[in-house]
Image (spheres, rainbow, N blue to C red):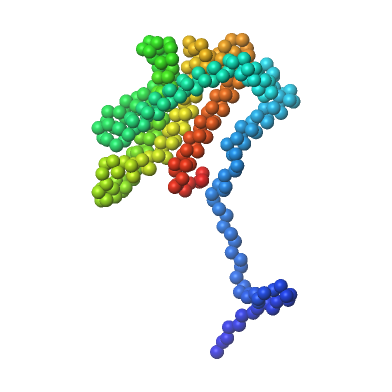
Amino acid sequence: MTTTTTSTVTPTTATDAAPVEVTGKPARKRRRGLAPGKRLPASRVIGPALFFALWAAASAAGQLDPGAIPAPWTVLSTAGHLWTDGTLPTDVLTSLERAGYGFALGLTAGVVLALASGLSRIGEALIDGTVQLNRAIPTLGLIPLFILWLGIGETFKIAIISIVVYIPIYLNLHSALSGIDHRYVELAEVQGLSRVAFVRQIVIPGALPGFFVGLRLGVTGSWLSLVVLEQINATNGLGYMMFQAQNYGQSDVILVGLLIYGVFGLVSDSAVRLIERRVLSWRRTLSN
């Protein structure tokens, strides 16, 4: 007959509360996580801050031609001067108004067309092919035709911006609607959901991630098209200010306009991302 013995280590000090059993098993290593980890605070501004720091360092060291790329403090001084004399506030408000009207029209058109095409076979047959054809045509190439149709004023600029905006919104929302798992449709039929309840409880939550991707692309597209359109028969706006600065060789004014466009793009994209995180807080993804 064999007996099993277990060895223990006797406490050697008063602080040892109990014997420690020695089992001879190696300690289990903690598995390294594969997720990116916690989000860094103010992570969206680290990259731009590093860029400006390198720009300032290169300018201070004399590595950049001041005539071609002025120093950051020169650009800020120019921006302050343009703001105090009233030029910059007027141009900024004009650009915001154009981008806002164009974005609102494009957002409405993209959502309505995507819903009509994604939820109906007849709508898809009538709409999707036309949108895909419009997508294949360079939008800025439509400028001469829209000038003939709508004139040289503000209307054609807003129309071009709305086209640039609605295409990515439509494509991503339509793709999200088409990608909803058919098992959810069968579940809704078994539960006896009405058409309205099906759209509210199944379609909208399933399509929201794709919608926000298209929304971010649409916001960026509105600013990209605006900088071109404001150089065509415009009398104000950031693009007009930059075009006039080009004629006089004022690179600092051009950089002021580019930086403002960049700030607008970053702020608007961050706002959309914030809304997305709040609306889709139920999702567990790598980003959160």
Residue 235 left/right relative to 148: right
Q: Residue at x 46, y 45 (%)?
A: 281
Residue 163 left/right relative to 121: right
Q: Residue at x 54, y 27 (%)?
A: 264
Across and down, in percent, residue 164 comes to 42, 24
Residue 227 left/right relative to 40: left
Res. 149 image quadrant: top left
Q: Residue at x 32, y 25 (%)?
A: 130
> Would you say residue 164 is visible in this rendering?
no
Across and down, in percent, residue 131 comes to 34, 27
Q: Residue at x 41, y 36 (%)?
A: 211
> Would you say residue 109 is visible in this rendering?
yes
Q: Nearer the viewer, residue 66 or 29?
A: 66
Q: Residue furthest bottom?
A: 1
Q: Is residue 140 above or below residue 201?
A: above
Q: Which quarter of the rendering shows the N terminus?
A: bottom right
